[in-house]
Image (spheres, rainbow, N blue to C red):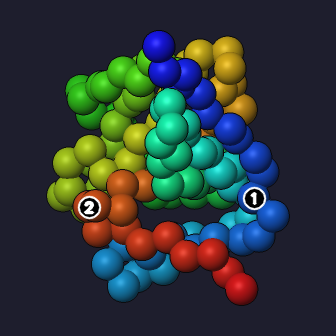
C-alpha cells in the first residue's frame, strides 16, 4: 500500500496572488503544503491565512470535496468563477495548521508568485 501524507511548512518568503492581472494580496502569512503519494510528489500548494486575505471571501457555496489526508474542503466562488477558492474548516489532525487558511485554484484564473 502506498503511503499518502502531507508536509507543511511556514513560507520563508512572501507571495503575491493575482486574479487575471489584478494583484489581490501580498503576504508572508503563508503555509506551503507538499503532498506525497507513494513515489509521487505533487506541486506545493500555498495556503494563505484568512486574516491576510480579508475582503476577498464571500459566503461558501454548497460544493465540498474530500481528501483522505486533509478532510472536507469547502469552496468559495470568486467574481463569477465557481469553486475558485477552498478551505479546510476542520482539517484532520495531521494537517491542523491549515485551519483558517485558504488556497486559490490556479486553473481558475489565479496566479501565485513568490516575491524575490
Q: Residue at the spot x=31%, y=25% of the render?
A: 65
Q: Using a 10 Å C-alpha cutoff, classify the residue at mark 2 as few (fewer than 14 neighbours), some (14 to 19) or many (20 or more).
A: some
* Residue 89 location (% of width, % of height): 53, 25
Q: Under tag 2, what secondary structure?
A: helix
Q: Which residue is mark 1?
A: 11
Residue 59 lies, with reference to residue 69, above or below; the image says below
**Left or right of 15 in this view: 61:** left
Q: Residue at the spot x=69%, y=49% of the render?
A: 31
Residue 110 lies, with reference to residue 116, above or below; the image says above
Dot placed on the residue nearer the N-terminal end, 1 or 2: 1
Q: Using a 10 Å C-alpha cutoff, classify the residue at mark 1 as few (fewer than 14 neighbours), some (14 to 19) or many (20 or more).
A: some
- From the viewer's side, name the closer residue of 92 and 85: 92
Q: Which residue is mark 2?
A: 108
Taking the image as drawn, is residue 10 in sight? yes
Q: Marks 1/2: CA distance?
A: 23 Å
Query: Which mark is drawn over residue 33?
Result: none
* Residue 116 location (% of width, % of height): 71, 86
Q: Quadrant of residue 76?
A: top left
Q: Label 2 near label 1: C-beta < 8 Å? A: no
Q: Residue at the spot x=31%, y=51% of the render?
A: 84
**Left or right of 37 in this view: 93:** right
Taking the image as drawn, is residue 51 in sight? no
Q: Quadrant of residue 107?
A: bottom left
Q: Residue at the spot x=20%, y=48% of the render?
A: 82
- From the viewer's side, name the closer residue of 7 and 73: 7
* Residue 37 location (% of width, % of height): 49, 32
Q: Under tag 1, what secondary structure?
A: loop
Amino acid at each position: 500500500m502506498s503511503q499518502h501524507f502531507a508536509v507543511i511548512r511556514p513560507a520563508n518568503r512572501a507571495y503575491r496572488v493575482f486574479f487575471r492581472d489584478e494583484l489581490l494580496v501580498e503576504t508572508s502569512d503563508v503555509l506551503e503544503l507538499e503532498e506525497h503519494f507513494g513515489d509521487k510528489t505533487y506541486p506545493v500548494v500555498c495556503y494563505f491565512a484568512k486574516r491576510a486575505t480579508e475582503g476577498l471571501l464571500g459566503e461558501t457555496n454548497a460544493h465540498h470535496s474530500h481528501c483522505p489526508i486533509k478532510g472536507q474542503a469547502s469552496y468559495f466562488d470568486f467574481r463569477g468563477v465557481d469553486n475558485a477558492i477552498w478551505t479546510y474548516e476542520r482539517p484532520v489532525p495531521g494537517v491542523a495548521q491549515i485551519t483558517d487558511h485558504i488556497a486559490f485554484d490556479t486553473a481558475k484564473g489565479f496566479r501565485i508568485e513568490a516575491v524575490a
